[in-house]
Amino acid sequence: MRASLSLAGTCLLVLGFAVAPAAAQGPPRRPATFPAQQRPPGDPALVARGQQLYAVNCQFCHGADLRGGDSGGPNLLRSQLLFNDQEGELIGPLIVGGSQTQGGGMMPAIPLPGSDVQAVAAYLHSVQASMRGQGNPPSETVTELNILVGDEAAGKAYFEATCTSCHQASDMNGIAARFEEPKDLQNCWLRGGEGRGRGAPPAAPSAVTVTTSSGAVVQGELIRYDDFFVSLRDADGKRLSFTRRNGMPKVEVKDPSDAHLQLLPKYADKSIHDVTAYLVTLK
Amino acid sequence: MTLRKLLLAAASLILAPALVISQDEGVLLNPVDIYKPLVDSWPVYSGDYTGQRFSALKQVNQSTVKNLTLAWTEELTAGAPGGGGFRFGGGAPAQVIVGGEGSGEFTTGNSANIKGSILMIDDVLYVTSPDNVWAMDARDGSLLWRYFWKTRGGTHIGNRGAAMWNNYLFFETPDNYLVSLDARTGEERWHVEIADFEQQYFSTPAPIVIDNHVLVGTGNDLDAPGFLQSYDPETGERQWIFYTVPMKAGDPGLETWPNLDTARHGGGQVWIPGSFDPETRLYIFGTGNPTPGYTGAPRPGDNLFTCTLMAVHVDTGEMVWYFQTSAHDTHDWDSAQTPVLYDAVVDGQPRKLVSTAARNGYFYTVDRVTGEHLLTQKFGTYTNWALETRPTGVVEPNPAKEAIIPGSLVSPVEGGVVNWPPPAYSPATGYFYTHERNGFNMLYLTEPDPRGSMGLGGKDRVQIGSMPSYLVALDPLTGKAAWKHEWPGGGGGGLLATAGNVVFTGDGSDNFAAFDATNGSPLWHTRIGNPSNAPQTYMVDGRQHVLVAVRDRLYAFQLY
């Protein structure tokens, strides 16, 4: 569930405030994105001891990352019981007494003393508090994911058939050297080099032609336009603006990435991957 | 005794007789009045129960709308009182009533963020922003009172408005309380916890009052079950709870999940208000995405009743019918959008219908009495995530368009072809008005673990390009556009349709604008910024007002 794109910025902002330690009697701070982040951090020694106890007693079933293991233990990071638990009072009886799980399995009884249960709880809560917003786990897998699954030869053929009406193959020489990550290269060529994303060249302004009702034509770089207004900068760098009514003056915009945008509905994902596999060879 | 207490004591003496009068006379809003079509006031989230956001007012019409002028504007100050005072001009600052379960430890700043409906009842506006409610004079925007809720924290993304029953207001807080105020004074009557804060629920919807029910939804991004609840408006006691995912063995829909544990973490939040059909007493609403949102591998199946149009009996909370608008969603495309109820003739027969334009780019029309499917039609021009449509009308998702490691090129973008801002419908034109936002994302899987991710994790979503986007008038019986108006700036915000044959909305280029409902021609605009809620209209002293919010500022327009 996510309401709109603007939320991403909001969440980062809120998270930024959340990670700043709050003084006990300090000024009001921004709330964190979720309650587990708002709890006071546990005693580091207790958390460390809890982590050791977890590794010995719990990890086999619940996984090193608490998100469930091969032996069928459920994901603790989304456990409602654990969210409601404060310092082991809710999870303690399950640890000590065992439990039938919702998945149909059986959690064995693990006879830990109360102080150990508290340590395990402190550790689990410390991991919950490190989760990111919108239910994201603390961190993703660190495995390097290779997006280069395409066929270089097929990509070259696709490029020659589709892209050479605008680009010379030699224009692309060195493009791979500009991007550390193949993913950034892929995103950039798909966009047509708009100024978004790492390594991308700055966005070029759109060209605009404004035709007034008297037939006068003005051309330049578009500043902005809507149904009621258009502004542009002409070849001399002079800013011009017009009120628009009923579609007049007429506005024709040529976005430099238009050719790329027009291709977006036409690509098969395989062609995208193939072209990227080809472009990464152009160091 | 402080001056405030003295004033309160005096007020309570004056108001005491009002508390014992019957429901039928002298109250601000008798619940039966919400059954009436929308005219002078705005007594519930969508104006009336139909979800049409269609006002019968026509003083402002195709010819006169060009003469709309600013009646008043006010900037709303939120947050704890005493932090900088009020900017409302003239006279002493209005009273701020403070409630809440928080310790005052958290602040969310002094900027209001108006993303919901504003009630207009008896010439008073009731405006909300997370943790704040304002009562304002509908004539000039003067502040009458403000209520401030001290939060326990959590996600403060928005609030969709308040509800009223007799003299009492209801609103939800981000830390999951349903709060009831006396609308005349802003004094709190009670508050009840409606969802578990520690479990990461956060509440944004506008409650919906139907007779002696207050329907409340809530939200959650972390693999928690969604639900709709009904509360007693007098006592605050819960009347029923309806879970949108299977919660126990034998529950309907369980066969669409691999097991009960997965279903119980399956999402389907109810975070946008629905509509109500008085004849069948069905409350009809949409549910949110399944969780984990982007990694569908651990939850094979259709995942009922996530991304589903649902009809629940308002007196019992029992489901009567459902139609799934996004089976096994893997793109965070909630189907929570407010459904629109209307009547039309289909194949010579009068039908009672409900339509919804879903975030995933498909438009659906269903018989609102039986749930019988009538129409599935793609309305997002570039929408590309689907295979063929099943005989049932449910769209088959294409697994190749899920997040994959080398990236899949997906339309619409994550925010969808539409989002929470509501559509409108005009019985005069028979058109369903909606934005159509088009664009492409690359969607990369970053969590290949077969356990999947959690919440909205496990993916990297990159914006690639915006495609032409439109204001669209759909024929809801065909799903085809009667007209389209292309947005230079992408459009945005909710919609309002009126009997004056005008449609109001934002153009995405910082204009609030009016369009001819019959053909989409621009008729009027004002450059006040992009609206943050859906425009509304009301009548005061014989003058039709058009009301809209841009973040923390309200604008009211009228003809001069």
Image (spheres, coloured by chain):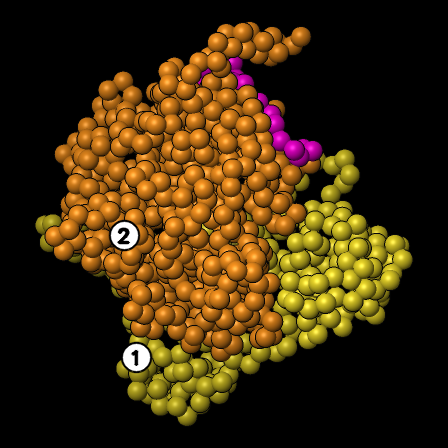
- Judging by the rendered image, the residue that carries numbered circle 2 is B367
Judge from the rendering whether residue A95 lies leftward or rightward of residue B413; answer left or right: right
B499 or A226, nearer to the observer: B499
Identify which residue is drawn at 68% across, 75% down.
Answer: A70
Tell which residue pokes out farthest to the front in this image: B250
Tell which residue pokes out farthest to the bottom in this image: A153
User: In whole angstroms, how far apart are the C-alphas of marks 2 and 1?
Assistant: 51 Å
In x, y percent, where is residue B285? 39, 48
Mark 2 and mark 1 on one chain: no
Does residue B391 sit above or below A47 in this rendering? Answer: below
Is residue B39 in sight in this rendering? yes
The subunit carrying tag 2 is: B
Residue interval drawn in magenta: B84-104
Is residue A184 in sight in this rendering? no
Q: Residues within 10 Å of mark 2 (few under 14, many from 20)?
A: some
B257 or B340, nearer to the observer: B257
Residue type at tag 1: Cys
Q: In the rendered view of the protein, which quadrant contains the N terminus of chain B?
A: top right
Does residue B471 sit above or below B189 in this rendering? Answer: below
